[in-house]
């Protein structure tokens, strides 16, 4: 971080500045209706875009951007401890070149080498609802962790819920890229500042907006198109029937990328989106192995995810958690144990990583499979 | 003529001696009270005047000056009426009372001369004994509590009309029967048997009671959190007699002795709109807050997340030190408040919990809500219990184990702790050094070390797990903490934000 690594040409950097200036103007015209979605608008040239978004101040804005000198633009990046690459240099990721509406420049904060070697088949995008259930969060964290451990770069958007969990899982085990809808030097949402900082230090945060740019509603669908294009497969973990993560899924499908979805209960609103995708033919993603099989071909890379063997009574408790018992009381009642016995069993399972416990004291099952179940 | 009587004013929960000097001399008829009286004391003029004339005494039509010494101390409350009236009668020559300066007295006068009860009679009687008084006159209704003070003659007086007979030695009232501080029958009170099913919650309550650990229950409304908290005093060990006296002194000073007549441990459940002053004590003159009222008992904070942040912050230091310091310009008072903290909270603002599909809370709202949980008092909480509504089968099932049986185990565990740590102490109060001296089996140490390494536990969390494991070992009656006890402790402990 901090070193001068900007190879982007001045024109592309000016484009990214212009987008930041246009933030409030595009906000008014990007309605989400066909024809005025932000990825469609971003296909336009500088002149056309300004004419559509801000006809009254078009000349003024263009003039302001043209006046920016290359030195000024570069110094700005260095001051924010960022760097940039553009579609004219070889650091620009291959995946983005496929997209018609690809960003001109990418501003990054973190390790540029991560972008240099990035091929679509080396990355997986994990997206989902901000309002995620504990099931969704657990699946996202495990997916992130296992995919990263298997050498995949996990791409997501740093948002609440699924995104953050995928990043958290991945940053512990391997590499991850966060794509933001504001300047890469801005932690958004602010609640994820510590996660953002950790990704900046260890991995990479990118954006098509310059340092200091504020997020707008339209910048999120715009950032989704980058997430969709960067990777070979997009996995939707949890999403309501109308959710922003489904935009990412649509964009990925349009680019001809693989689309995966994590099945959920048919009664759960939070899983309606992925269940619909599955009905429409998306890949079933039960775990990281399913993703690897879909992307690289069945059996190309194997994950070892078998936990240590369990005593019969621990296996019974594990079965209760799998059956939906999420508190110690529920487990004790389901397996007919005393309170202390159930507590000790859950603590052991947690240490063996078969279950996790939230700060609210609610247990959920991890993806670790027990030897007994895998033998069946 | 000049006469002097002795009385007391209440300051927090302590009684401060006040000398009442009355001077009656010639001049324009008038009645003046000097010496920093508050409004209630100043109004004593009217009460004394009416009471004297209604009891057949003559109110002297002369210049009367009442001085309350020391003049620098603020005097509050109506408890000085009796002393002012007695000194006035003596100064006016209507009562020949040579022993007046050797007795103390306290009581509020009604207009008909009857004497009404005052707050803090127990503290006042004890202060009178310490001040060297031979006897203390108290309102008849305060007799039983004042009689708790030993080594001083307690004389209950119901009316000003009894004074002449008392002074002449014609009437000798019997010392009232002291209030019983032995807990009466526990039966009939809230009993843990009401908690059906929920074995883990029962275990959490038992461990909390046995080690004096603070407990947080998280669960949807109607899951039994308040029910469980209300039954906690019934499984705590009975108060030792010195402790019972402390509790009675506080209750007496706040005029609540009647509420806790059972002699059991106090249970206070303040509403979440309470102010910091209401919680830890405050105001001028300082009054004890809920934390002090819960001394040696349970302070239950329902809806922990809804409490004002400053109120919870104010509770921090008292939780650590077991006492509250209230500083005012004039002086600093220290009030005791060693209580067990029990809190309850919903898992999210709507109460249903995020796992529930009907939960309609925005993620940021949930995060903010849970953030309040992990802020505020969380680092003072040892045990976390997730509570769910019991199933119909559980509610309809057999009643749980009764409080008396659980209390027996708790008492045995507390005895073990006192043997190890010294009298009156429990595991929750172990210092980090003491916690690290707990006898651990190698299996248990391995379990703790594994978790410590895996989850990057803080030193504080490490010690908390040790304290909990020690309490469970005390409950199980084993000398060395084994793997089983450690595993239970790791499950019960409050999770740091991960």
Image (cartoon, grey):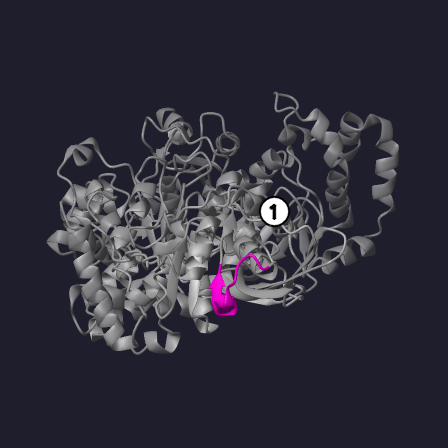
Residue drawn where x is 63% and y is 26% of the image? A37
Q: Is residue A117 left or right of residue A151?
A: right
Span highlighted in magenta in the image: B93-105
Q: Give neighbour class at mark 1: few <14, some 14-19, many 20+ (Cα, 10 Å).
A: some
Using the image, determine if residue A273 lies above or below residue A104: above
Q: Chain of mark 1?
A: B
Residue B359 falls in image quadrant: top left
Q: Nearer the viewer, residue B360 or B334?
A: B334
Using the image, determine if residue A52 lies above or below residue B80: above
Q: Is residue A168 in view from this perspective?
A: yes
Give the image location of residue B379, x and y in percent: 44, 60
Q: Secondary structure at mark 1?
A: helix
Q: Nearer the viewer, residue B265 or A243?
A: B265
Give the image location of residue A83, x and y in percent: 68, 56
Asked if residue B103 is among those painted magenta in the image, a careful observer would answer yes
The residue at which mark 1 appears reads as B49
Q: Is residue B21 left or right of residue B440?
A: right
Asked if residue B128 is among those painted magenta in the image, a careful observer would answer no
Residue drawn where x is 24% and y is 41% of the image? A325
Q: Quadrant of the C terminus of chain A?
A: top left
Residue drawn where x is 26% and y is 76% of the image? B420
Residue A269 falls in image quadrant: top left
Give the image location of residue B200, x and y in percent: 23, 49
Residue B292 falls in image quadrant: bottom left
Q: Is residue A93 in view from this perspective?
A: no
Give the image location of residue B252, x and y in percent: 42, 55
């Amino acid at each position: 971080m901090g070193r001068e690594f900007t190879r982007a040409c001045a024109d592309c950097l000016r484009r990214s500045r212009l987008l930041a200036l246009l933030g409030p103007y595009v906000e008014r015209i990007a309605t989400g209706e066909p024809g005025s979605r932000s990825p469609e608008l971003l296909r336009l040239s500088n002149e056309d875009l300004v004419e559509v978004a801000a006809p009254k101040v078009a000349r003024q804005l263009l003039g302001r951007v043209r006046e920016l000198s290359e030195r000024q633009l570069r110094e700005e990046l260095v001051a924010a401890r960022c760097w940039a690459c553009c579609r004219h240099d070889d650091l620009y990721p291959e995946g983005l070149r496929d997209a018609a509406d690809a960003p001109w420049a990418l501003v990054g904060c973190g390790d540029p080498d991560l972008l240099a070697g990035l091929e679509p088949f080396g990355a997986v995008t994990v997206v989902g609802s901000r309002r995620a259930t504990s099931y969704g969060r657990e699946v996202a964290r495990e997916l992130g962790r296992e995919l990263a451990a298997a050498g995949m770069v996990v791409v997501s958007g740093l948002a609440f819920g699924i995104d953050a969990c995928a990043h958290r899982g991945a940053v512990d085990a391997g590499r991850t890229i966060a794509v933001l809808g504001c300047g890469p030097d801005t932690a958004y949402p602010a609640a994820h500042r510590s996660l953002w900082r950790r990704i900046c230090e260890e991995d990479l945060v990118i954006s098509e907006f310059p340092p200091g740019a504020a997020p707008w509603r339209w910048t999120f669908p715009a950032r989704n198109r980058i997430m969709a294009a960067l990777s070979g497969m997009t996995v939707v973990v949890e999403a309501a029937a109308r959710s922003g993560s489904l935009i990412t899924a649509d964009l990925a499908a349009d680019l001809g990328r693989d689309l995966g979805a994590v099945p959920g209960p048919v009664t759960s609103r939070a899983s309606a989106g992925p269940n619909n995708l599955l009905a429409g033919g998306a890949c079933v993603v039960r775990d990281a192995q399913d993703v690897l099989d879909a992307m690289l071909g069945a059996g190309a890379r194997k994950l070892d995810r078998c936990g240590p063997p369990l005593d019969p009574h621990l296996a019974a408790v594990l079965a209760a958690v799998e059956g939906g018992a999420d508190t110690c009381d529920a487990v004790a009642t389901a397996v007919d144990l005393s309170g202390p016995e159930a507590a000790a069993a859950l603590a052991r399972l947690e240490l063996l990583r078969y279950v996790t416990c939230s700060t609210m004291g609610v247990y959920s099952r991890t993806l670790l499979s027990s030897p007994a179940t895998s033998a069946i | 003529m000049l006469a002097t009587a002795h009385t007391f004013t209440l300051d927090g929960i302590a009684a401060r001696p006040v000398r009442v000097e009355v001077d009656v001399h010639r001049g324009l008829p008038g009645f003046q009270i000097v010496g920093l009286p508050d409004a209630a004391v100043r109004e004593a003029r009217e009460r004394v005047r009416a009471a004297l004339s209604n009891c057949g005494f003559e109110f002297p039509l002369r210049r009367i000056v009442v001085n309350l010494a020391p003049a620098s101390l603020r005097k509050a409350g109506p408890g000085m009426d009796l002393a002012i009236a007695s000194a006035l009668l003596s100064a006016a020559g209507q009562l020949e009372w040579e022993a007046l300066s050797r007795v103390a007295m306290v009581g509020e006068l009604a207009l008909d001369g009857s004497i009404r009860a005052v707050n803090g009679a127990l503290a006042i009687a004890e202060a009178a004994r310490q001040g060297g008084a031979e006897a203390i006159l108290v309102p008849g209704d305060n007799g039983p509590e004042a009689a708790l003070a030993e080594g001083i003659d307690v004389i209950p007086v119901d009316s000003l009309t009894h004074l002449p007979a008392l002074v002449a030695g014609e009437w000798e009232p019997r010392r009232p029967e002291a209030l019983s501080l032995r807990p009466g029958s526990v039966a009939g009170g809230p009993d843990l048997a009401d908690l059906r099913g929920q074995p883990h919650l029962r275990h959490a309550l038992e461990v909390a009671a046995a080690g004096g650990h603070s407990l947080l229950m998280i669960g949807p409304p109607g899951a039994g959190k308040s029910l469980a908290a209300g039954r906690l005093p019934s499984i705590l060990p009975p108060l030792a007699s010195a402790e019972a006296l402390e509790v009675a002194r506080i209750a007496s000073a706040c005029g609540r002795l009647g509420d806790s007549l059972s002699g059991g441990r106090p249970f206070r459940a303040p509403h979440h709109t309470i102010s910091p002053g209401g919680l830890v004590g405050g105001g001028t003159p300082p009054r004890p807050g809920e934390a002090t009222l819960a001394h040696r008992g349970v302070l239950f904070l329902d809806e922990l997340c809804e409490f004002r942040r400053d109120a919870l912050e104010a509770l921090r230091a008292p939780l650590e030190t077991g006492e509250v310091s209230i500083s005012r310009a004039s002086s600093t008072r220290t009030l005791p408040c060693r209580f067990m903290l029990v809190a309850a909270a919903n898992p999210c603002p709507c109460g249903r919990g995020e796992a529930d599909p009907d939960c309609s809370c925005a993620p940021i709202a949930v995060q903010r809500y849970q953030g309040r949980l992990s802020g505020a008092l969380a680092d003072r909480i040892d045990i976390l219990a997730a509570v769910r509504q019991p199933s119909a089968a559980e509610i309809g099932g057999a009643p749980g184990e009764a409080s008396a049986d659980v209390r027996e185990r708790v008492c045995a565990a507390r005895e073990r702790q006192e043997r190890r740590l010294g009298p009156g102490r429990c595991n929750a109060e172990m210092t980090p050094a003491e916690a690290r001296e707990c006898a651990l089996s190698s299996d248990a140490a391995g379990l703790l070390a594994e978790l410590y390494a895996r989850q990057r536990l803080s030193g504080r969390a490490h010690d908390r797990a040790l304290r909990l494991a020690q309490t469970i070992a005390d409950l199980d009656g084993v000398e060395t903490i084994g793997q089983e006890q450690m595993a239970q402790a790791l499950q019960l402990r409050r999770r740091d934000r991960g």
